[in-house]
Amino acid sequence: MNSGLGANRSPSDPSPLPPHQLPILVEKLAKENWEDAASLIEQHWDDLAATHPGHLLDAIGALPGAALIERPTLMVAANYLQHVVNGSSPGRFDDDGWVNTSQTGLGVSLIDTLTLSTAKSAGARTTGDMPGARRSAEEARAALDSAPAPERAAIKSSLPHLRLQWGRSLELADAPGSALEYEEAYETAILTKQTAVARRAAAHHAWMDAERGRLNSAEQWVSRAHDTNATNTRYDAVISLTASLLRLDRGDRVGATRELGRSNGFGDGEYWAAALWVQSMIANDSASAALVDSRLAHQLTRHPDSLSNTGANGRYIRAAGARLSGFRGRPAGISAVDPGLSSTDKAAAGVFAHARGNYHEALNIVRMIVEPEEHPRTQSIALLVTAAAAVNLGQNETAAAAFAQAHALLNHERLYTPYECIPWPDLEHLTAITGLELPNVESPFRLKKNHFAILSKRELEILRLLAQGKTPTETAQILFVAPNTVKSTTRRLYRKLDVNSRSSAIDRARQSGLL
């Protein structure tokens, strides 16, 4: 069996310990640093797997639950060793039929079944196989639900670690049930006094709520995570990433940048795609966008299939690319008719259709977002696109109704970034016909009001041509005016925008959604 253990052993590794001493030393080392303890098992795998599998199994059992969460191969290795110890065929450890709960009479325990399914789920998740990750997680849940109550009670202390993994797989696969798994993991961890696991479950739940636009709930779960007082920098990146998104959504870009820096200091781990998405939203000029674009390109070389991934990571990467495309000056290339795209992708496609002036297309796209109880972030964007497209088509009644719904939803959650998905002139028109006010926060759409509402029609025309790379002479020819008129108008434009260069003016315009 190629477990992955022992693969890094070098000639300089120490001589094997007496087999019966390995579990004792692993338990001792694990109290200080479980990674050292896991490495010790790896060093002795080749020597003991065939001759003393029971001692190796005991050594893995001496590791804390966090080790199994971090290194799913340890769970697979433990199940392999269990089969060897029981005298059954080691090759069956990877047989899907083995996890069938109907075989419990053959000596397959509940914890064996759950552990192997969880390991398969984590492994599939790591390789980007989201359908496989979801399938194995749901198999594990079904096995637990169908087990007798005494068997479930006997493994109660192991359930927080397992359910945490199921929740993560379901979340990344965009499958239902992830919130329930995180909640169960948190509650059971609190009851069994496993505060580190409770903190991590609360942190995962907080991110999931924040990403979906349920900011009030996200804040509650962040508070629960902090209340555990079980700080572990290995798992705290997601807390800072969540705090960054919360601050950004509430209009505090400076605070969002600060929290993102903390998250980067911890390391993104499985949240690499989510972190890129947040970074792309914080970027507010060409320089910062270029930096995120470089990071995105680097990650795409490491995860080449992520753009077509049907799970959450694919959504994050496509959303980041769409956001950055505005700074690149070319369309995002998202098609609402692509198979497998989520509601989030369709909402983004609606935004870009509206930005291109294809108002009927935009309305048709967002009508495709038909899932009941859609998440507030996606739902609000769909409503805003509906309102903006309708107002441009002269359908003021439809526009007012959609904008009022979006406004109420966003104000309830104090979620403000979705307003940025439509141009300021449309927002201004919608507030005029509804009498509703936008939140008074520092945000790009506030800049739109301060700057772009005071530009003349001619200034806006010149600004758009500048963004297309036209020279003053070319601009004059297109607009049928003298070159000196273009130059004087451009100087006036710069004064109004409080900038002194073409690139700065274009950055401001792209933030506005006008380009």
Image (cartoon, rainbow, N blue to C red):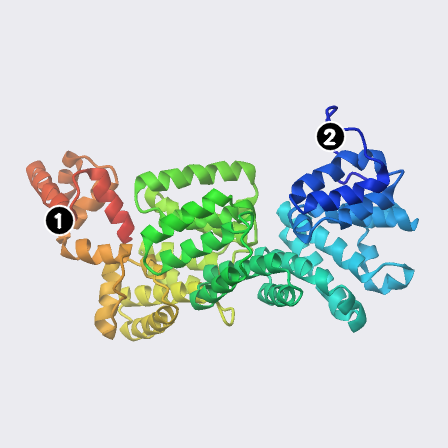
Comes first in the chain, label 2 or label 1:
2
In the rendered structure, are the residues bearing label 2 and label 1 in contact, judged by CB atoms less than 8 Å apart? no
- Mark 1: give few (<14), some (14-19) or many (20+) Cα within 10 Å: some
Which residue is painted at 65% across and 56% down in the image? Answer: 165
Amino acid type, mark 2: Arg
Across and down, in percent, residue 84 comes to: 88, 46
Q: Quadrant of residue 113?
A: bottom right
Amino acid type, mark 1: Lys
Comparing 71 with 197, the one in front is: 197
On the rendered structure, is 428 left or right of 296? left
Give the total of numbered labels. 2
Which quadrant, please, contains the N terminus?
A: top right
- Mark 2: give few (<14), some (14-19) or many (20+) Cα within 10 Å: some
| SS at circle 2 | loop
- Asked if residue 331 shows in the view, the reply is no
Across and down, in percent, residue 334 comes to: 44, 50
Residue 289's mark?
A: none
Across and down, in percent, residue 491 comes to: 10, 41
Comparing 162 with 406, the one in front is: 162
On the rendered structure, is 180 left or right of 214? right
Which residue is painted at 81% across and 47% down in the image? Answer: 57
Give the spatial CA distance, label 2 vs label 1: 66 Å
| SS at circle 1 | helix
On the rendered structure, is 52 left or right of 328? right
* Pair 2/1: label in front: 2
Q: Which residue is mark 1?
A: 496
Q: Hey, which residue is sitting farthest top in the picture?
A: 11
Across and down, in percent, residue 207 comes to: 50, 58
Q: Which residue is mark 2?
A: 9
- Asked if residue 182 shows in the view, the reply is yes
Comparing 288 with 306, the one in front is: 288
Which residue is painted at 90% across and 63% down in the image? Answer: 105
